[in-house]
Image: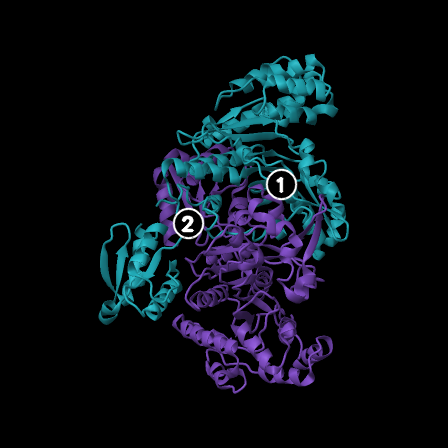
Chain colours: A purple, B cyan
Amino acid sequence: MPQLGLLPGRAWAALLGQLLRPPRVVCLGAAHSHSQVAEAVLASQLKPRQEKSNFILKTPKEMLAEKYGEDSGLIYDLKDQGGELLSLRYDLTVPFARYMAMNKLKKMKRYHVGKVWRRESPTIAQGRYREFCQCDFDIAGDFDPMIPDAECLKIICEILTGLQLGDFLIKVNDRRILDGMFAICGVPESKFRAICSSIDKLDKISWKDVRHEMVTEKGLAPEVADRIGDYVQCHGLPGGLSLVEQMFQDPRLSQSKQALEGLGDLKLLFEYLTLFGIAEKICFDLSLARGLDYYTGVIYEAVLLQTPAPAEEEPLNVGSVAAGGRYDGLVGMFNPKGHKVPCVGLSIGVERIFSIVEQRMKTFGEKIRTTETQVFVATPQKNFLQERLKLIAELWDAGIKAELLYKNNPKLLTQLHYCENMGIPLVVIIGEQELKEGVIKLRSVATREEVAIKRENIVAEIQKRLFES
Amino acid sequence: MPQLGLLPGRAWAALLGQLLRPPRVVCLGAAHSHSQVAEAVLASQLKPRQEKSNFILKTPKEMLAEKYGEDSGLIYDLKDQGGELLSLRYDLTVPFARYMAMNKLKKMKRYHVGKVWRRESPTIAQGRYREFCQCDFDIAGDFDPMIPDAECLKIICEILTGLQLGDFLIKVNDRRILDGMFAICGVPESKFRAICSSIDKLDKISWKDVRHEMVTEKGLAPEVADRIGDYVQCHGLPGGLSLVEQMFQDPRLSQSKQALEGLGDLKLLFEYLTLFGIAEKICFDLSLARGLDYYTGVIYEAVLLQTPAPAEEEPLNVGSVAAGGRYDGLVGMFNPKGHKVPCVGLSIGVERIFSIVEQRMKTFGEKIRTTETQVFVATPQKNFLQERLKLIAELWDAGIKAELLYKNNPKLLTQLHYCENMGIPLVVIIGEQELKEGVIKLRSVATREEVAIKRENIVAEIQKRLFES
């Protein structure tokens, strides 16, 4: 049984290797999140050490408020015994920004997996949950333009490729281009974020409906909406700079200073993406807006082009599996003096990826190992528990992942079947014969070959086999 | 800079390797906890899929109630918008038991790291927090006696040894022995758990004070208290069965059927601990009681015998760093039909271990690497960002952990200092000269030796060096 085809080496690969094991498997925990990117609000209540720097956070609602735009309604509120209002964190980004500010950190590069909560009306078909798990990666700090941004996109590509989720595309846009576009189309600045949220729906509903929302609900003049329509219906080709160039030439858009800044950065970004060998996975898309308020620059969203599905089944509609962007203002909002720390990051929807991987396993009859056990300690005889325990302790002490059945007298067949079901590659067998001869039988589960190894050499032999495999 | 001296191989070793990195480091998240051992209560509110099997959990308070004895006052309560009472999980054990029951699982072996909340009045000196991180390992299922229990103790020994926390001792006792002892001393059964909580304080306050509490607060007759005193002041020697044997012979205690069961299991346990080579780390201690209500059999608690402290500083008073026991009734409490799943497990206090490791680092001037970066990509020249990006992408694509400075033109000295500070072992250097000759300079940070490697061989050479180191 193969493990998932994850690239080795990068920390997220190991991480997602963990993520992708079925729920019964051991999981690594948010070991540091309490000190690193703790619950946005609870931490401020609970951490005595931090009270000094906490005054901003004393009214937790304010902390989550005005960060999420129209999504704010989804913030999951609670009330603690003291009657102070608390909320469960809506994402990992705002708590990360708060942590940076509270600890006066100027730069950090980290990833974090944790749960977030949203008051959705959950319909699993849409892959929406009220409690779900996000995996975030962020690079905070004042660096030269687009280098960390390009790395974020490289990481998304590595993850989606490594997880074999099928073909994907990453849409890229820039908030400054959108704002410039809104300005030259005649959107009042007060409506910029609201119109962003409308445009963000273009991947779910038609332009006609979005236009209707902008005009009727958000009070945009029809001709303004139509001007926006001309732009947001422009999609660049993957890897291509042609649309960027076209927008540079656009007589109206080129009037906007901030739009030009955004376009300039996109051009630089695509240069770096080409060096990273991923440009053909990325396309400039003026209709990408992202709902959240806190983005200030480049934004991106990865969508799967098709998900494998059994002939008889509907393909999963999972929407975007990863998204993110640059948020240069968020940390400053938590800093008493307003000191800014530019940030760029990405979020991966873990459940969505699970559902795709699970469906793929169903489709292709794949099986993923649910344990890391390397060696199983077995015996053909009764009353050999003591020898099994002595042997497994030797393996454990040598750092070998080993297990046995917690039974005094298990049947050999039961033990071997267990190894086949669990995909354990090696079995060490000790019985009267082996004990007498001072050997251990080493069995390969796949080939069923057995060889007798001197007891004193068994650890070395196992390590050799594990290294070769 | 050495990584911590953790044994390789076992999953918890990797886990604790993660735990022990300073907070700025990437951390692996509770990827599966939402589906595995989610917040005791919130999950029941938030998971629509599970509502069917949720009816028991519809009154969350009841779920956490009557599990923690006198500690129940520490449960951190909240109130959600709907007005339904919620609590933050007090530990990872009750949520795990609930998960087993809700999903009708008969066995599971897993570890989990996550935050728990308690309404302590926090004083960092005591190492008590209101929000802290626990690492739990549990074996659930109906197995032959004491085999999983012995593995739990083996794991505690491996962890504490691997983390080099200094000499430690694991006290072991059994709830059935305590209850038998209470019975023959004349404690009314209704007072068993309350007296347990009093005895549990013996590691913090004197027998005199505990006796006073039992008599005045818990209404125990003085002579009953004194009889208990005779027992709880008996401590066995590490590895020794003598106290167990002595209790077998005890004219009064040997009257108690359940005490004899407990003593019999302890005898078996010590046999297995000897096979695991850890018996000398374990001692039978009749004063070990554990506060929590849910334990039904063997209980244990690991204490450090001394913590390294700088001459001028107070040694940390961290109390127990790991503890646990057998809780055979808890899962049944969440099962509509009361079906039981025997469980044994352990909890490790992550912050306490951090504070010890941090103090050790201070004491011995140790430094722990805060990143896993294997190779740094540097250049001596200006305007070499493109070549650095192309090169680092090659390394990333080969699964090598690499980083560079996010600057267009960093100074070479800055780049090399960064590697020394971060403990990055290798540097690849690309400049005009190298580009012309089609080579990459490979530098060992420790020895400062540099060799020129053909560009096409650089990945292989790095992988060779990393494997050898």
Point 36% across, 55% down: residue? B374
User: In the image as oriented, which residue stretches furthest toward the front?
Assistant: A337
Is residue A266 positioned above or below A432 on the image?
below
Tell me which label, 2 or 1, sits earlier in the chain.
1
In the foreground, A427 or A355: A355
Residue B198 image offset from top left, x and y in percent: 65, 24
What residue type is disc 1 on? Asp
Q: Chain of mark 1?
A: B
Would you name the residue on which mark 2 appears?
B370
Mark number for residue B91? 1
Report which quarter residue B116 is drawn in: top right
How would you rate the neighbour count of disc 2 (Cα within 10 Å): few for under 14, some for 14-19, many for 20 or more? some
Q: Please state the chain letter of the residue tagged with numbered disc 2 in the rendered image.
A: B
In the image, what residue occupies the spot 56% across and 17% down?
Answer: B234
- Direction from residue B208 to residue B240 in the image, left or right: left
- Name the residue type under label 2: Thr
Q: Residue at x 62, y 62 (%)?
A: A67
